[in-house]
Image (cartoon, helix red, strand yellow):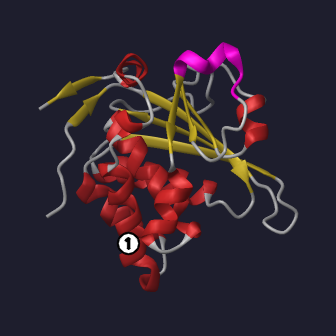
Amino acid sequence: MPMKSKKVNCDINLMIRGIGGQGVKLAGSIIGQAAIYDHRHAVQSMKYGSAITGGETRSEIKVSIERIIYPRMTDIDVYVALTQDDLENFFDAQIYLTATEVAKTIPKVIKDKLILAPMLTISEQVGSRKTMNMVLLGVLNQLFNLASDDSFEKAIEKLTAPKFHEINKKAYFAGKKFDLTKENPQRILKLANICKIDD
């Protein structure tokens, strides 16, 4: 039985950066679709990189309880880096998230605002490294209550091929249920409470 997420009551701006082939665009699209299923508003803008050349890929997602008049992102609440380069060349944000396996060196200025999760390892345990973006979605929803689990499942089913539904949802819930206190002190995890949560 899927866990139910609590209802989030705020606007939130997310930026996900990686390289072509990591599923950055798809992750952003699923967040937006899940939010819409929860009767919220969402817009996404993207910068594409080639999966062959490993070019930069960026997804910017705004989620709001109100209609979004200005889709351009001026402030970043959550910055996700899926490569070491993206971690080092970060944008200003309230809080940062990356895969433990990526963070070989951490810029001092963001060290006290960075949440780590072993997303690559979790995806391997699920059965495929290609599901790391789904693990990311689970971790993000655990931290920020972006939408209900039911809405994320529906979005995954809508935006991915049927043959991948089972493993993608398995990866999502693996990220959602991962105990982040294994990798992070409570003082940093508390920084994720950037929204008012309604039961």
Question: Is 47 on the left-hand or right-hand side of 171?
Answer: right
Residue sitting at x 58%, y 39%:
98
Q: Is residue 90 above or below residue 45?
A: above
| Residue 41, position as x, y percentages in the image | 39, 40
Few, some or many residues within 10 Å of mark 1 (<14, 14–19, 20+): some
- Residue 169: horizontal and vertical position, in percent? 36, 67
Q: Which quadrant, please, contains the N terminus?
A: bottom left
**In the rendered image, which residue does mark 1 sit on?**
157
Q: Position of residue 198 (x, y in %)?
A: 16, 28
**Is residue 111 a member of the stretch shown in magenta?**
yes
Residue at the extreme right = 53
Secondary structure category for the residue under label 1: helix
x, y percent for residue 51: 78, 66
Prevailing secondary structure class for the magenta stretch in the rendered image: helix
Q: Nearer the viewer, residue 55 or 68?
A: 55
Q: Residue furthest bottom?
A: 163
61 is higher (above) or lower (below) than 193: below
Q: How many marks?
A: 1
On the picture, is 6 further left or further right than 195? left
Which of 90/124 is in front? 124
Magenta segment: does it hold 14?
A: no
What span is colored magenta in the figure? 106-113
**Label 1 sits on what residue type?**
Glu
Q: Residue at x 26, y 54 (%)?
A: 149
Q: Residue at x 84, y 69 (%)?
A: 52
In-front residue for pair 181/95: 181
Quarter containing the C terminus? top left
Seen at 39% across and 52% down, the residue is 175
